[in-house]
Image (tube, rainbow, N blue to C red):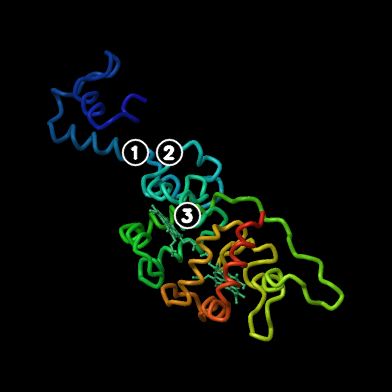
């Protein structure tokens, strides 16, 4: 391809002056404007990473992902969330393991202030909808392995002995707290509406409970997590967060 794939200046020069005696130069026959509009047209034929990924709705784009440079809308996120979706700073969550719908929705909640976080608001406010889809698809594609099943044996009396494990797998019916696994999955692996908890940063998890309790995090339907968070003690929150962060 002589014209395709070059810089704008190269393409313009090739049209005007020709290429290595093989393609004649059209500099004398075309006006400057005609050369410029041809150049622009040829530039528009070049594949660009962002359109390629965004336009590809099936899973095949995931396979080719490593062969494409990260689009700039994603690369800004990697300084905190990592290229592989594993957080590189304390307080930032791992995004690998979260589903597309969940990530996309959280971006919206940061933008409209339901999740009150200045850092993340600054990160997402200027993203176009296409870029939101793109970053959410990118991070959702980094599927870490399904977590192992950690459900402990249930003793004869039917009640799991360890209080943290009991809360996770059985809940606390006296306080009307359902088991975390009811919504977040048997292995805390998450789904489209419920985030994965297994292996999430414990600093981040504690922070989220504090955010529900202070009202800084809202926006889930029926305030499901506020209703859980307000009933837990600070000690329970610490223990749960530690337990969940250590799940493999
Ligand atoms: C400077 C560091 C930083 C950068 C850069 C950054 N984030 Fe974040 N991100 C955070 C922090 C801190 C939180 C936790 C906010 C909170 O506690 O509510 C977060 C939370 C999130 C969450 C919520 C995840 C969950 O489990 O609910 C998503 C989604 C997210 N970021 C996406 C992005 C995207 C997409 C980009 C790039 C456009 C980005 N972030 C760039 C620091 C960052
Ligand atoms: C009735 C369903 C339900 C139950 C039970 C439940 N959760 Fe949640 N949880 C949710 C929903 C929905 C969200 C997402 C909220 C949103 O979209 O902002 C969530 C989000 C979270 C998050 C935020 C994770 C992140 O990536 O930001 C944490 C932490 C969490 N839940 C912990 C727990 C723990 C621990 C338990 C058990 C004590 C529990 N949840 C029980 C529905 C539930």
Camera-side mark, 2 or 1: 2
Lower position in the chain sequence, tag 2 or tag 1: 1
- Check residue 45 in the rendering and tell me which mark sits there, or answer none: 1
Dots 2, 3 in contact, CB < 8 A: no
Disc 3 marks which residue? 90
Q: Quadrant of ligand 1?
A: bottom left
Mark 3–mark 1 distance (CA, rounded to whole Å):
43 Å
Q: Residue at 71% of width from left, 71% of height from top?
A: 169
SS under mark 2: loop
The outermost residue toward the right is: 156
Disc 2 marks which residue? 69
Query: CB of residue at label 2: within 8 Å of ligand 1?
Result: no
Task: Please indicate whether residue 77 sits to the left or right of residue 23 in the image.
Answer: right
Residue 193: x percent and y percent?
55, 68
Task: Please indicate whether residue 183 sits to the left or right of residue 74 in the image.
Answer: right
Q: Quadrant of residue 155?
A: bottom right
SS under mark 1: loop
Camera-side mark, 2 or 3: 3
Lower position in the chain sequence, tag 3 or tag 1: 1
Mark 2–mark 3 distance (CA, rounded to whole Å):
27 Å
Q: Residue at 42% of width from left, 77% of height from top?
A: 215
Task: Give whichever of 85, 169 is nearer the camera.
Answer: 169
Q: Quadrant of residue 25?
A: top left
Residues packed near mark 1 inside 10 Å, few (<14), some (14 to 19) or many (20 plus): few
Residue 164: x percent and y percent?
68, 70
Does residue 80 lie above or below 151 as drawn? Answer: above
SS under mark 3: loop
Q: Quadrant of the C terminus?
A: bottom right
Camera-side mark, 3 or 1: 3
Dots 2, 1 in contact, CB < 8 A: no
- Check residue 100 in the rendering and tell me which mark sits there, or answer none: none
């Amino acid at each position: 391809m002589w014209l395709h794939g070059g810089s704008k200046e190269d393409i313009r020069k090739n049209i005007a002056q020709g290429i290595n005696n093989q393609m004649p130069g059209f500099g004398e026959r075309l006006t400057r404007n005609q050369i410029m509009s041809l150049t622009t047209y040829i530039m528009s034929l070049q594949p660009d990473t962002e359109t390629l990924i965004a336009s590809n709705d099936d899973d095949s784009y995931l396979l080719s992902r490593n062969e494409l440079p990260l689009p700039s809308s994603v690369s800004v996120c990697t300084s905190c969330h990592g290229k592989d979706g594993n957080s590189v700073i304390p307080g930032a969550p791992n995004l690998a393991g979260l589903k597309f719908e969940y990530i996309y929705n959280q971006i919206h909640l940061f933008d409209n202030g339901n999740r009150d976080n200045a850092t993340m608001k600054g990160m997402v406010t200027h993203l176009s909808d296409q870029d939101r889809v793109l970053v959410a698809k990118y991070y959702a594609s980094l599927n870490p392995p399904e977590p192992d099943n950690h459900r402990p044996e249930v003793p004869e009396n039917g009640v799991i002995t360890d209080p943290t494990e009991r809360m996770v797998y059985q809940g606390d019916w006296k306080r009307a707290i359902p088991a975390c696994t009811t919504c977040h999955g048997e292995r805390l692996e998450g789904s489209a509406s419920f985030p994965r908890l297994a292996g999430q940063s414990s600093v981040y998890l504690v922070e989220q409970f504090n955010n529900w309790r202070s009202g800084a995090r809202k926006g889930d339907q029926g305030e499901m997590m506020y209703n859980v968070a307000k009933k837990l003690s600070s000690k329970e929150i610490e223990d749960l967060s530690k337990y969940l962060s250590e799940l493999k």
